[in-house]
Amino acid sequence: MNNASLLYILVQNALEGIITMDEIGIIETINPSTCMLFGYLEEEIKGQNISILIPALDHNSYKNLSNYKATRQLSITGIGHEPVGLHKAGYQFPIKLRISEVQSSGRTVFAGFIHDLSQYKIDEECFNDNASHMEELVKERSKSLNDTIFALEKEKEKISISLEKEKKISKLKNRFLSMASHEFRTPLSTIQLSASLIEKYAIPFESESISKHIAKIKNSVTSLTAILNDFLYFEKLEIGKMQAVFTSFDLVKFGDEITEEMQFLAKPNQNIRCKHVGIQTIVNLDANLLKNCAINLIGNAIKYSGNNCYIDFTTEINDSYCLISVHDNGIGIPLEEQKHLFQAFFRAHNTSNVSGTGLGLNIVQRYVSLMKGTAEFKSNQKEGTLFTLKFPIT
């Protein structure tokens, strides 16, 4: 197969429309794709002016074809818009037109390459519609976002005002708690002293009623003093005034002193059993904070346990930790409420008949944290409660 035959086959089978025309636009050859594109038979096109297919190619365009050699510029689409094809059925459709000069047998022939843009225009219009729709959506979303941001700013402003008010209220509350804790101590001490003196002076009378009421006064003063202490400690923790001061002390002696002190507050036939585990006895912690923690835990064990029971107070020093534990066989902590146990002012529903502020365990946990330790517990309503304070040995 020679080159001419191969070229003819390629043109005849090309998907793009291909035509040739002379310098005045008379069609000389046309391939099947062009016939299919415009709806004509080949014999209907040959010898016709190109304007039958492309109306934009008027006589001015022909002059452009004639002058192409001289100017080397071709203004086929110089009419200001894209050319359109004219179908035999009478409707127009968008096309892409490219024209090039070809030399054949000593004369100039122009070859036109025509591509149907109908689907491209449909896709472009669809794309533009989608783009417009997306632009509208973006505008709506932007407006919605701006509205949300504006609302959040307003809400933030309200929250800031509320927080400022809350801070002022908190300061007033802390001042009141501090003042009350200090100011109430003097009259309570006076009441406690007066009760002791009355008890002393009443000894000759051997009155059981007097002793009973004096005991009630002392117990009430002790309870109220403990409540005031809780508020005072809590207030100091809230404003950051409480700091741990680490010193070395004997943990066995520490446990014995607390046991002796708390045994006086125990209910009838309640016994506090103190023991130490391990050879080492010296620990480096804040003795005052640790004492407050131990007294709080043992005090709770006394309050929430019945008569005729044991309360185990255990200290331990091993290679890794110093452990302080208090175990009682009291009422226990309901399982569903255990997650709230260390929250300030929380009290389990089964403690309503026992006085308390709900601050004790919160204070214990925060004191333990100041000493770089952790507070843990295990509890159920059958076997009682075990609290363990764990401090790493450093």
Image (cartoon, rainbow, N blue to C red):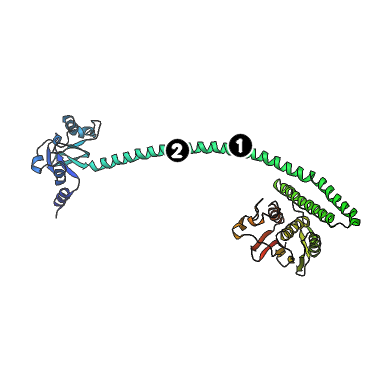
Spot occupied by residue 44 in the image (x, y as percentages of width and height): 8, 40
Residue nearest the observer in this picture, 392 or 155 = 155
Q: Amino acid at mark 2?
A: Ser
Identified at 25% across, 32% down, the residue is 81
Residue at the far left in the pictured view: 43
In the image: residue 25, left or right of residue 348? left
Residue placed under numbered mark 1 in the picture: 161
Q: Is residue 178 left or right of residue 348?
A: right
State the image coordinates of residue 291 (x, y, percent, origin top left). 77, 57
Characterize the local packing of mark 1: few (<14), some (14-19) or many (20 or more) Cα atoms within 10 angstroms. Answer: few
What residue do we see at 84% from left, 54% from top?
210
As drawn, which residue projects farthest toward the right?
204
Look at mark 2 in the image and give the residue it sits on. 144
Where residue 297 sits: x, y (%)? 72, 59
Q: Are marks 1 and 2 in contact (CB under 8 Å)?
A: no
From the image, state whether disc 1 or disc 2 is nearer to you.
Answer: 1
Q: Quarter of the image holding residue 209?
A: bottom right
Front residue (pair 210, 345): 210
* Horizontal relation, residue 383 to residue 145: left or right: right
Residue in front for this viewpoint, 198 or 362: 198
Residue 76, image quadrant = top left
- Please tell me which of labels 1 and 2 falls first in the chain: 2
Residue 264, relative to residue 109: is it above or below? below
Query: Circle 2 sits in a helix, a strand or a loop, which is it?
Result: helix
At label 1, the amino acid type is Ile
Secondary structure category for the residue under label 1? helix
Quadrant the C terminus occupies: bottom right
The quarter in which the N terminus is drawn is bottom left
What label does residue 322 carry, if any?
A: none
Question: Is residue 170 or residue 32 the one in the foreground?
Answer: 170
351 lies left or right of 54 = right
